[in-house]
Image: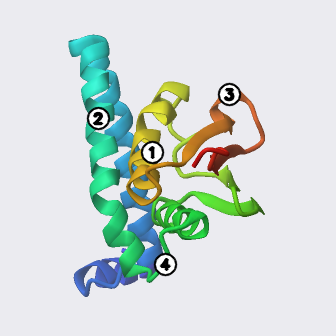
Amino acid sequence: MSFKSFLLKRLITWDGIPYYLRWKKSVSGIGMIYAGTLEMIQEKYGKDGVNNLNEIMYNIGLSQSTEILETLDLNRDLEGCAYVLLAMHRIFGIKSKIVLKDKNKIVIHARKCCWGGHLTKWNFRTCLSIDNYEAGLIEGILPFSEHAYTKRRSCGDNVCELVISFNDSN
């Protein structure tokens, strides 16, 4: 047995696996589970099954929105909403930032994630489905806002661009 193998076995025994590795493998695994689940639901239940999964994702985001906002001690406004999204992006390994902010609109760019481009089953459809979680977060915080992805890496763009805004009547 090599010294490296001996040392790694001791790290495992003493629960010394670095948190970064735990996080990275967990997030990657979540993506693999989600992509596989979406594919299985599509094959077995068709469009109705996918719609049900999308609704579940939306409801999870909706139910977590206020708790995350309050945990982070943020205001129920565009900036607070954006920072909730950025926090959740960080948790799920998405590199994102606010690129434009004014009183009626915020634009977030995501330039890298642990799933898109890394998992073979991850595609545009998978992104659309999991985006329902973000829609629930946003609508739970700002129910009268509008939000849309105007660019997607899974469609060949350099970044995913999410625009959250209020129209003139809100």
- Residue 93 in view, yes or no: yes
Whether 133 is drawn above or below 141: the answer is above
| Mark 2 or mark 4: whose residue is earlier in sequence | 2
Along the line of sight, the residue nearer the viewer: 131 or 16: 131
Mark closest to the chain's N terminus, 4 or 1 = 4
Q: Position of residue 120 (x, y in %)?
A: 51, 31
Q: Which label's residue is closer to the chain start, 3 or 4?
A: 4
Q: Residues within 10 Å of mark 3 (few under 14, many from 20)?
A: few
Amino acid, disc 4: Leu
Q: CA distance from mark 4 to mark 1?
A: 18 Å
Give the residue type that dot 3 points to: Cys
Q: Residues within 10 Å of mark 1 (few under 14, many from 20)?
A: some
- State the image quarter where residue 22 is shown: bottom left
Check if mark 2's residue and mark 3's residue have beta carbons within 8 Å.
no
Front position among marks 3 and 4: 4
Q: CA distance from mark 2 to mark 3?
A: 23 Å
Which badge, 2 or 1, is on the more N-terminal residue? 2
Would residue 124 appear left or right of 88 to someone viewing this image?
right
Residue 124 screen position, x and y as percent = 55, 27
Q: Which residue is mark 1?
A: 135
Residue 155 is marked as 3
Q: Earlier in the sequence, mark 3 or mark 1?
A: 1
From the image, state whether disc 2 or disc 4 is nearer to you. 4
Judging by the rendered image, the residue that carries numbered circle 4 is 74
- Name which residue lies at 34% across and 85% down: 16
- Rendered residue at 34%/23% (across/down): 39
From the top left corner, tell me how far across and down residue 68 is, in percent.
37, 70
